[in-house]
């Protein structure tokens, strides 16, 4: 037994014992998505349920699993703060049970380092320790260095099913306060079957992608379709926020080589991943894949270093000024800004770069247009009109850069379903947008 194994054994405890390090009033935080430490969070919640804890707050950019910190019965004892609202916590936040912190994804590490007054406990679900004493935070790199440097206490849930993923997302046993062990399969995210509309929009975007481009693809049917439809391209690279299953396929079919990138040559770079077991197996111990903090992956200046950078993201609605809402339904909070603005700006800085924001043109079985004269009252502007490059629906693809407000309005109207265009044109003329 080497010294790292001795340290491991000395710090190994049950989840219940690990939870004893959390005190009333503590600020706790974990990395994005699958690194939320299931066993530790459950044990902390049980302490709160017994009346041993009050005022503990759990911060997470995206809680994929959900947890007892979202349980209304524990309100005031173990509470949730979201930094990007996902499906697990969306309803509770919409109902006003919990709150969220507005941000762009790239700014979160800096918030923890410089803005948040304290972080008492950093806890995470990690891969087994290697012979050098290191644990990998697997599917996330996003906030790991910032959080672990800020926290007074570091607690780990060591899951033997967590892949060991390379990059800047490691924690050394010497930094750890206490740990427990678990064995649970990772939550998977299966891609929905592509619709004909997804494929139509995806093809319009894929046609704009040159060989040798570097890609960022968001989550959802349209970005997935783009990934599928790029398999005949050559020498593509990946520098992305979220790593997806379609990217695995692009790598394995040979379309992605990462050899034309100016930095991280030969490497796929991401800051989080969530997908199928096939993806997890691909990432495990793979030196061609690296997880990095989000203030690196989403830094517009780093993104802009890549010529022909292609960014593909989705949204909720667009108005005739070119304003994009991607995070609310009117005043109803739905998700968050995430990295959309980071990558729009990065693509704008890239020589030959193109930033695409795509959506279907209607909602509710074609009865509502998602192209609006003005955004639905209360809607949050995620990407400003000045930064939008390409907009895409199943009806058209348009590039707004350098166009007059009048021409932009006409282009945006062409994205709408035909039955809504006359009304949109009427409203545009009434607002003196079309002259």
Image (cartoon, grey):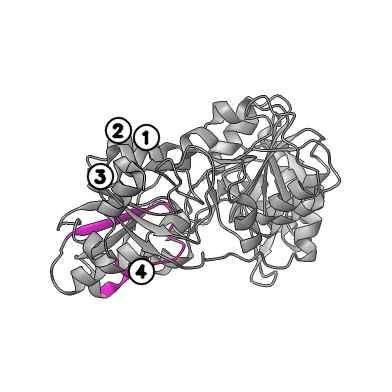
- Residue 96: image quadrant is bottom left
Residue shown at 16% from the left, 56% from the top: 23
Left-right relation of 36 to 187: left
Magenta part of the protein: which range? 55-72
Left-right relation of 301 to 57: right
Q: Secondary structure at mark 4?
A: loop
Spatial CA span between label 3 and label 1: 13 Å
Q: Secondary structure at mark 2?
A: helix
Residues marked 1 and 2 touching at CB (< 8 Å): yes
**Coordinates of residue 408 in the picture (x, y in percent):** 70, 39
Q: Secondary structure at mark 3?
A: loop
Left-right relation of 171 to 176: right
Residue 359 belongs to magenta span: no
Picture layout, residue 250 above or below residue 267 = below
* Number of marks present in the image shown: 4
Residues marked 2 and 3 touching at CB (< 8 Å): no
Q: Which residue is mark 2?
A: 114
**In front of the other: label 2 or label 3?**
3
Q: Residues within 10 Å of mark 2 (few under 14, many from 20)?
A: few
In this view, the residue in front, 30 or 1, is 1
**In front of the other: label 4 or label 1?**
1
**In front of the other: label 4 or label 3?**
3
Q: Which residue is mark 4?
A: 95
Q: Which residue is mark 3?
A: 119
């Amino acid at each position: 037994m080497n010294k790292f194994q001795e340290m491991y054994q000395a710090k190994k405890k049950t989840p219940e014992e690990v939870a004893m390090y959390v005190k009333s009033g503590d600020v706790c935080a974990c990395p994005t998505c699958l690194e939320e430490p299931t066993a530790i969070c459950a044990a902390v919640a049980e302490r709160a349920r017994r009346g041993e804890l009050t005022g503990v707050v759990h911060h997470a950019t995206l809680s994929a699993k959900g947890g007892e910190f979202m349980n209304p019965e524990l309100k005031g004892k173990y509470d949730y703060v979201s930094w990007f609202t996902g499906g697990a916590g969306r309803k509770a936040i919409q109902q006003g049970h919990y709150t969220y912190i507005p941000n762009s994804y790239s700014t979160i590490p800096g918030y923890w380092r410089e803005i948040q007054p304290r972080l008492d406990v950093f806890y995470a679900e990690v891969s087994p320790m290697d012979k050098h004493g290191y644990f990998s935070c697997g599917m996330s790199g996003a906030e790991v260095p910032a959080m672990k440097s800020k926290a007074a206490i570091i607690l780990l849930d060591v899951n033997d099913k967590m892949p060991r993923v390379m990059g800047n997302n490691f924690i050394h046993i010497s930094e750890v306060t206490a740990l427990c062990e678990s064995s649970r399969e990772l939550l998977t995210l299966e891609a929905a079957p592509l619709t004909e509309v997804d494929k139509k929009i995806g093809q319009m975007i894929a046609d704009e992608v040159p060989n040798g481009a570097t890609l960022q693809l968001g989550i959802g049917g349209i970005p997935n379709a783009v990934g599928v439809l790029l398999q005949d391209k050559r020498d593509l690279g990946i520098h992305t926020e979220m790593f997806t299953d379609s990217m695995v396929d692009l790598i394995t079919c040979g379309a992605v080589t990462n050899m034309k990138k100016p930095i991280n040559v030969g490497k796929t770079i991401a800051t989080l991943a969530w997908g199928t077991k096939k993806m997890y197996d691909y990432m495990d111990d793979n030196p061609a894949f690296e997880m990095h903090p989000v203030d690196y992956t989403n830094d517009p200046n780093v993104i802009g270093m890549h010529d022909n950078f292609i960014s593909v993201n989705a949204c909720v609605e667009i108005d005739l000024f070119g304003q994009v809402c991607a995070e609310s339904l009117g005043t109803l909070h739905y998700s968050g800004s995430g990295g959309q603005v980071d990558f729009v700006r990065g693509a704008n800085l890239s020589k030959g770069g193109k930033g695409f924001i795509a959506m279907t043109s209607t909602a509710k079985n074609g009865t509502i247009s998602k192209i609006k004269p003005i955004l639905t009252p209360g809607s949050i502007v995620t990407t400003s009109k000045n930064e939008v490059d390409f907009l895409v629906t199943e009806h058209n693809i348009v590039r707004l850069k350098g166009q007059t407000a009048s021409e932009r309005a006409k282009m945006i109207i062409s994205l709408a379903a035909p039955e809504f265009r006359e009304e949109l044109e009427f409203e545009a003329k009434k607002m003196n947008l079309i002259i």
